[in-house]
Image: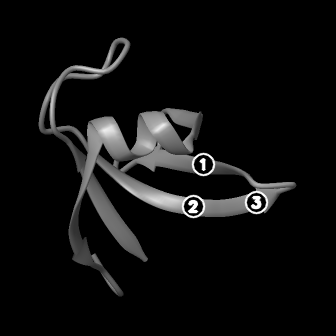
């Protein structure tokens, strides 16, 4: 599973918060990403522009 981290504050989440990328979909050229915090408490669905602006790839995690 891919792990991403916030580059800067986004909504109520602080910079550095880690997220699992749960799903990535594209419908008629519009990409949407579903991410979940690593503590599994919160889930967000965002568009491609927000994803690219606020998140950076951290690591590929298989058993963390």
- Of callouts 3 and 1, the N-terminal one: 3
- Which residue in the rendered view is the most extreme toward the front? 29
SS under mark 2? strand
Please identify the quarter of the rendering in which residue 8 is found: top left
Q: Is residue 3 left or right of residue 41?
A: left
Q: Residue at x 38, y 72 (%)?
A: 2
Please identify the quarter of the rendering in which residue 51 is found: top left
The residue wearing badge 2 is 22
Question: Is residue 41 visible to the viewer in this orientation of the structure?
Answer: no
Q: CA distance from mark 3 to mark 1?
A: 12 Å
The residue wearing badge 3 is 26
- Which mark is in front, 3 or 1? 3
The residue wearing badge 1 is 34
Please identify the quarter of the rendering in which residue 14 is found: top left
Residue 26 position in % (x across, y down) = 76, 60
Q: CA distance from mark 1 to mark 2?
A: 5 Å
Q: How crowded is the residue under tag 3: few (<14 C-alpha within 10 Å), some, or many (20+)? A: few
Residue 4 position in % (x across, y down) = 29, 57
Q: Is residue 16 left or right of residue 5?
A: left
SS under mark 1? strand
Which label number is shown at residue 18? none
Check the picture and name the quadrant holding the N terminus.
bottom left
Cβ–Cβ below 8 Å for labels 1 and 2?
Answer: yes
- Which residue in the rendered view is the most extreme toward the bottom? 62
Q: Is residue 59 left or right of residue 25?
A: left
Residue 37 position in % (x across, y down) = 39, 44
- Of callouts 1 and 2, the N-terminal one: 2
């Amino acid at each position: 599973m891919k792990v991403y981290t916030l580059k800067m504050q986004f909504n109520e989440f602080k910079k550095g918060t880690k997220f699992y990328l749960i799903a990535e979909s594209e419908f008629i050229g519009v990409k949407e990403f579903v991410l979940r915090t690593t503590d599994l408490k919160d889930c967000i669905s965002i568009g491609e522009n927000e994803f690219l602006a606020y998140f950076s790839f951290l690591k590929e995690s298989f058993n963390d």
